Image (cartoon, rainbow, N blue to C red):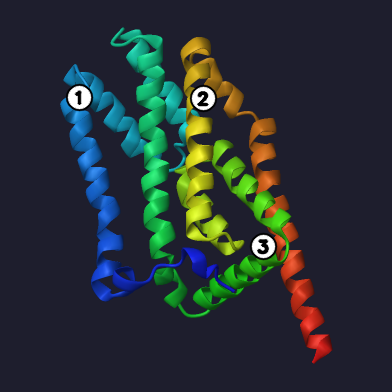
């Protein structure tokens, strides 16, 4: 069951509302880049930061590689103070997660129209939402899980995977987005701070199998518990019938 308290109504349920929700993230992203161009000086620093933003969208690049590289370049050229460097790089990379998750969370209904795949997305989402409605602690665990998913460095934008994960396990789009925002800014500022004071060695830390293994186990653990509960519930309903 959907959490109707947070569902759109009125304008956003119309075709023009859906068009607005589809294109608005692109407009926001373009405005952000333009403001960066106006604010960030010298221009070479802007191109360094914007290059990092572009790379963040494409695996194998992730926040664990993009942030140290951009911080390193800005630091070596002595453009800004430590606080300014960390804030600029962490804030811009986190912003990518925020905008990309905004687009996905409010347009996931498009994927739900895909045959078979869309049916499973709706089933999982409705099941997760129902469980969260029945037990408040499940919602808290799911919220923390999505935030941790974004904090743990993976290849590509963490906001993309977390958006799908959050909705599929039943979080409404507002709670999922808040978890992504908290997780992204926390993770990006943590990595940027380490990158500034530790240097490129931070890249080797995040490339270790131990760190990657923790991230994989986290995702697999959440999915296993969710899928186990889902299929167990389905079997119980079939037996009742």
- x%, y% of residue 152? 59, 37
Mark 2 and mark 1 residues within 8 Å of each other at the beta carbon: no
Q: CA distance from mark 2 to mark 3?
A: 32 Å
Label 1 sits on a secondary structure element that is helix
Residue 56 placement: quadrant: top left
Of badges 2 and 3, the one in the foreground is 3
- Residue 238 shown left or right of residue 37 in the figure: right
Question: Mark 2 or 1 closer to N-term?
Answer: 1
Q: Which residue is mark 2?
A: 191
Say which label, 1 or 3, has the lower sequence index.
1
Question: Which residue does the numbered mark 1 point to in the structure image?
Answer: 39
Q: Residues within 10 Å of mark 1 (few under 14, many from 20)?
A: few
Q: Residue at x 25, y 62 (%)?
A: 20
Q: Is residue 21 above or below residue 210?
A: below
* Camera-nearest residue between 44 and 181: 181
User: Where does residue 69 sit, x and y in percent of width and height?
Assistant: 41, 22
**Residue 85: x, y in percent?**
37, 17
Q: Give the residue drawn at x 26%, y 75%.
A: 15
Task: From this view, report whether residue 66 is shown above or below residue 137.
Answer: above
Residue pointed to by mark 3: 132
Helix, strand or loop under label 3: helix
């Amino acid at each position: 069951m959907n959490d109707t308290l947070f569902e759109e109504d009125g304008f956003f349920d119309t075709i023009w509302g859906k068009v607005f929700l589809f294109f608005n993230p692109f407009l926001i992203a373009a405005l952000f880049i333009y403001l960066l161009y106006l604010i960030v000086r010298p221009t070479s620093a802007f191109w360094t930061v914007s290059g990092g933003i572009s790379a963040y969208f494409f695996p194998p690049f992730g926040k664990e590689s993009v942030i140290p590289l951009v911080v390193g370049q800005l630091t070596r050229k002595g453009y800004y103070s430590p606080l300014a460097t960390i804030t600029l790089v962490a804030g811009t990379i986190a912003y990518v997660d925020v905008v990309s998750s905004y687009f996905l969370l409010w347009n996931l209904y498009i994927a739900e129209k895909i045959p078979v795949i869309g049916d499973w997305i709706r089933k999982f989402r409705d099941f997760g939402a129902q469980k969260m409605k029945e037990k408040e602690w499940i919602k808290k665990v799911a919220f923390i899980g999505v935030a941790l998913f974004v904090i743990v460095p993976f290849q590509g934008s963490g906001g993309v995977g977390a958006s799908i994960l959050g909705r599929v396990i039943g979080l409404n789009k507002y709670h999922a987005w808040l978890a992504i925002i908290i997780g992204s800014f926390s993770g990006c500022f943590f990595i940027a701070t380490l990158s500034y004071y530790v240097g490129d060695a931070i890249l080797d830390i995040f490339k270790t199998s131990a760190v990657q293994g923790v991230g994989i186990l986290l995702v697999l653990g959440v999915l296993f518990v969710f899928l186990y509960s889902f299929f167990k519930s389905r079997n119980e309903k079939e037996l009742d019938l």
